[in-house]
Amino acid sequence: MSDVLLQVENLERHFDGLKAVDGISFTVAPGEVVSIIGPNGSGKTTTLNLVTGTIRAHGGSITLDGVRIDRADSARIAVHGIARTFQNGRVFATLSVADNIEVGLHSTLRAHRPFSRLSNLFLLRWIPLIGELFIAIVGTPASRRERKQIDAAVETEIHRFETRLGPRRDDPAYSLSYANRRRTEIARALALKPRLLVLDEPTAGMNQSETVEVLEQLLELKAEGQAILLVEHKLDLVMTVSDRIIVMDGGRIIAEGRPEDVRRDPAVIEAYLGRRRGLGGGDHA
C-alpha cells in the first residue's frame, strides 16, 4: 500500500432507489492530484461526501493509507488526515479570518482538548467539556506552548494567501468577498496539514482572474507534494493541474487516465459534452 494513499473499492450509494454512486473503484497516490469530472448529477460530489464521511456508503470500502475509514464519521476521518472544502462555501460568518482558519486545527489539538477520547462516550462526554473550560480559563504550560503552535499554523496559511487574506486576517468572514471566503475555507482545510486535500469546486463563482490565482495556488500545493482529490467544472484548470482524471456519468466511472488521453476519449466527449469534439478551450460541464 506504500504507493496508494486513498483506495476506493466498489463504492455504492443510493437515494430512494437511485444509484448515485454505482460500484466505483479508484486510487489516489501520495502527492498525486486526481480530478473527478462529469455532467451534473453524475455522482461527483456524492463521491466526495462518501470519502469524507459526510454520508455513509451502502457498499464497498474506503481506506486511507491502509486503514478502513468508510464507517468513521467526518470528525474521525479528519483526524486520520482528510480535510475538505464544500461546493457551497462554508465559513463561520462572525469569526475573523484567523479564527476561521484556527477551527481547522481543532482535531489536532491535545493540550486544549484534554480527555478528548471520552467525547464519543455519551455518559462521559461532560468530562472533556469541563477540561476544555478549565484550560480556557486557567491554562497550563502545555496549552500555552500549543497556543504558539496554533498561532504559527494560522500565520502560515494566511501567508499562503497573503495578498488577499493578509490585510483581512482580523476581519469577520461575513465582510469578505465571495472569492476570499473560498480562500479562507481552503486555508482552514490546509491548516490541518492533511494527507489528502478534498476540494469540491474551489473556483465556483470566481471570475477568470480569481480562477487563475487559485490555479497557481493549486500548482504550488502540487509542487509541495500535497495529494488532492478535486471536483471542478472549469476544464482548463482540471487539465492543467491534474495528474489523472476520472470521468463519471450516471454514478459510474466511464473513463480514467492522463488529461491528454481523457481529452480525446470519444466516450467521454459524448457523455460529458454531448458533442463530438475534444475537451478543452474553456468548456464547462
Image (cartoon, rainbow, N blue to C red):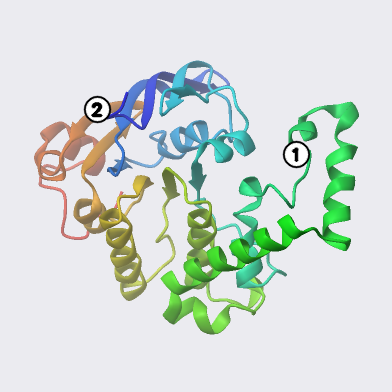
Which amino acid, mark 2? Ile
Q: Judge whether 86 appears above or below 210 on screen.
A: above
Instruction: Give the Cα separation between the discs numbered 1 and 2.
Output: 43 Å
Give whichever of 228, 35 is nearer the camera: 228
Q: Disc 1 vs disc 2: which is toward the camera?
A: 1
Q: Judge whether 7 appears above or below 129 on screen.
A: above
- Number of callouts in the render? 2
Farthest residue, direction front: 141
Task: Determine which quarter of the picture holds residue 1.
Answer: top left
Q: On the rendered structure, is 196 left or right of 224? A: right
Q: Is residue 151 visible?
A: yes
Residue plotted at (15% across, 40% down): 258
Q: Which mark is residue 116?
A: 1
Residue plotted at (37% across, 46% down): 231
Q: On the rendered structure, is 194 left or right of 36? A: right
Q: On the rendered structure, is 231 left or right of 138? A: left
Crowdedness of circle 2 by 10 Å Cα count: few (<14), some, many (20+)? Answer: some
Q: Which mark is residue 177?
A: none
Q: Secondary structure at mark 2?
A: strand
Q: Which residue is mark 2?
A: 254
| Residue 230 x %, y % | 36, 46
